[in-house]
Image: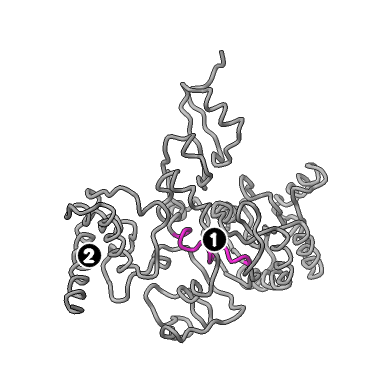
Amino acid sequence: MEAFPDLIVIDEAHCQYKAILELVERSKRSKVIGLSATPFTAGMADHWDGVVNGATVNQLLKLGYLTPLKIKACVAPDMTGAKKNFRGEYDDDDSTQRGLRIVGDVVQTWIEQTGKLFGGPVKTIVFSPSVKHGEELCRQFADAGFNFQQISYLDRTDNDRRAKIKEFRKPESAIHGLVSCAVLTKGFDVPDVLCGISCRPYRKSFSSHIQELGRVMRIAPGKDFGLWLDHSGNCISFAEDTAWLFEHGVDSLSDAQKKDSEVREPGEKVKQKYFCGDCGLQMEAGSDTCPSCGWQRPKRGEIQTVEGTLIDFEHSIADAYQPRKGLRAECLKDPRGVWNAALSHCLMNSKRDPEKLRRWAYGIWRGIYPNSKLPSGLYSAAPNGGAVTSDQWGLIDREITRFRRQRRDAA
């Protein structure tokens, strides 16, 4: 008979390795805890009893256990009409061909931004869609006088890869950057990496995006922030999902897996929503005037896009979920709490069909946050009336009164 410890802790539990799952199945008397920053893998709800958010990303940032990122949404390849693989992601060959067209921008942007923010080149990780793309990146970095080395699933030996990583770990490494193709997305820990470059666009894999960001968020002495250069469009595609995850964590495993099954694609509309159309600075929630250059946001129908603009990007609930202009309540900073208040109010004060009441609650919430949508799974969540605060109740009451007045005036 096999002997098992009382407690088993599994790191990177989202990987769902068959041997690990079988071990857990056999250790019926043990308590098993799985650790994961991205519990989005399909089937996790079948093997784990529940999810506990030990601490959210924003909490860890405030406590100093993670390093904040300065994110720049840079020139990215146009993936319109790109081929898809069997998983629904962009085809690697197509991503490579489109990505090769902007390799020069990748190198030049890295030189300019590291010089501006750090005074020169810094230790960097690049995520590439293919070996061919990575080879071209390394060649052009070399032409510019910098040593970037590629590691991939096609490495001749593990020893060769280990040697490059060992050198890269040194404080004064001769390697400026590692170019990763299908490796280093999880479990890789070199805390003094100051810059990450995303060159692999994703349509669905929110977990891959978050894992990549995490490679640059490790803390290290003298590291005040990390720089993330997004040449994939992922930071735009996953903007609201990232903001919600950083602030609230994961609601449930069954709902979380939907994060890796939804198609998202970057668009100018998202850029126009969050950033100055002139200097590219992220604008304050609800503001129509850029505090940096004084640019005025055009009225609807007059918006123009600026090609190749480098824009500042922060993962903030306040910026991702902007309330309707004119609303001032403090509770607006908590869109999740506002949703719970709307849902609780509707279900507790009417005996109509619950599904219709849920749709009514969503209409109230969208009236408060007109340009946002609820993350997957939250729509069907159970209400918690005991958690609703007085200012949240007041906000929902005022919104219902406003809606009824509008209907009366229209009639």
Residue 25, given in percent of the width and then of the height, sits at: 52, 26
From what the image shows, is residue 19 above or below residue 261?
A: above
**Magenta residues (range):** 231-243
From what the image shows, is residue 267 above or below residue 52?
A: below
Residue 363 visible in rendering? yes
Residue 384 is left or right of residue 183, and the answer is left
Query: Circle 2 sits on which residue?
Result: 395
User: Three-letter amino acid code at disc 2?
Assistant: Leu
Q: Residue at x 70, y 67 (%)?
A: 99
Q: Quadrant of residue 115?
A: bottom right
| Circle 2 SS class | helix
Tell me which numbered mark, 1 or 2, is placed earlier along the sequence.
Answer: 1
Q: Quadrant of the C terminus?
A: bottom left
Residue 217 visible in rendering? no
Query: Circle 1 sits on which residue?
Result: 224
Q: Nearer the viewer, residue 284 or 84?
A: 84
Q: Quadrant of the N terminus?
A: top right
